[in-house]
Amino acid sequence: MASACNSALLKRIGFKWRRDAANPVLPPQPDGPDGSYRCMNPFVLRLGDEYRLYYAAGDAGGQHRICLATSSVTDLTAFRRRPPILDNGAPGAFDARWCVLPYVHRFGDKWHLYYTGHEGSKLGLQSFPGIGLATSDDGINFTKVSAEQIITGDQTAEFPNNRGIAGGGTILEFPAPGGGIRYRMYYTLAVGTSSNDVRVDQEKHCAVCHSDDGIHWYDHRIVMSPRGDVTNEDIAVAAPCVWRDGNIFRMLYCGIGTRWGYYSISEAVSADGYRWERGEGDENLSLTPERDSPWESQMVEYPTLIPEGDDLRLFYCGNGYGATGIGTALAKVEHSTCG
């Protein structure tokens, strides 16, 4: 019953994205405060009339750090950039080479910034051994809570010996039994191991875990896996951006497939946030590379969403995993219910 409902919703309320003519709205700026040769992994918050766009910036030496740019909600052509707000860890740390995939959520009077570390080894996806945490009183000045990761990639029953994990997902809040809040985090389980077979090398799954305090996370489950018969996601599914729409759950996620060889963005729908429907074949494709585009002809990836009036605003990055920067698009949403 739920499956039939989900499938019907998926077919009825697919997004029609209107790309911004000014894209990319946040291109790399090597001579700017972030020193960026790459802008990737956007995550957006709105505070009053201002957008805060957190992202990962890659410098000339290949190091990646968490950065922040702000703009007026009414003008996305004039982002104001800051120097990096979160630096790499010490040599040998899980985040010694990269801090990427920021996600920011408020817990009481503290802002939590979750990020993914790259240790600097040459183990492919297994070089991303954990998700770290930094906290802040103002959402701008962050301090790491530990030199160690707080979430590791070996917590699911299916892949108990895995190391690779990546954030860039979503945190949702639910009433906890007995009172309080229970948090649900969606993330990417990166299980690929170095191989000439891209299906082995780049294998990723969408997963979820739970917490009562935003620090200790448990009950890790895989909620979505690649589909071998769908060529836009027969290699990997990743970066689940999940939100509630009435009494259903919706998701935008990235798929890697043999069709393009890189990322595209697709939709899924669920009655409970754990069992997801994607429809038949590639009917759930939401945003694809544009062959003639100077900045997104190769790939579109890492979606983050925010309501804007009667629309949803999407931020995402383009070619070369953000080597051409971050763009935006809008879509009308018809709110629907299941039942």
Image: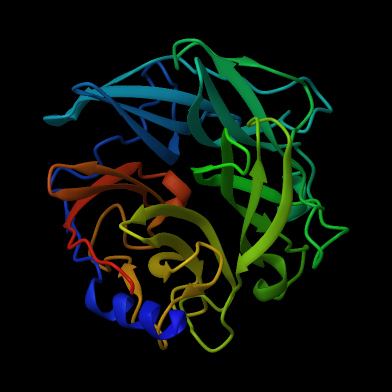
Residue 262 visible somewhere in the drawing: no
Q: Quadrant of the C terminus?
A: bottom left
Report the residue at 58% width, 18% height from top.
135
Q: Quadrant of residue 211?
A: top right
Is the image coloured rainbow, by chain, by secondary structure, or in one colour? rainbow
Q: Nearer the viewer, residue 7 or 174?
A: 174
Q: Describe residue 278's horizontal placement relative to residue 130 as left or right.
A: left
Report the residue at 66% width, 75% height from top.
199
Place of residue 26 in the rendered image (x, y in percent of width and height, measured from the top left): 30, 34
Q: Quadrant of residue 307?
A: top left
Q: Nearer the viewer, residue 335 or 140?
A: 335
The extreme right residue here reads: 161
Place of residue 183 in the rendered image (x, y in percent of width and height, measured from the top left): 57, 41
Q: Quadrant of residue 90?
A: top right
Place of residue 187 in the rendered image (x, y in percent of width and height, measured from the top left): 59, 51
Report the residue at 37% width, 19% height from top.
31
Q: Describe residue 256's horizontal placement relative to residue 219 as left or right.
A: left
The answer to whether 54 is drawn above or below residue 82 in the figure is: below
Q: Describe residue 290's horizontal placement relative to residue 277 as left or right.
A: left
The answer to whether 35 is drawn above or below residue 192 in the figure is: above
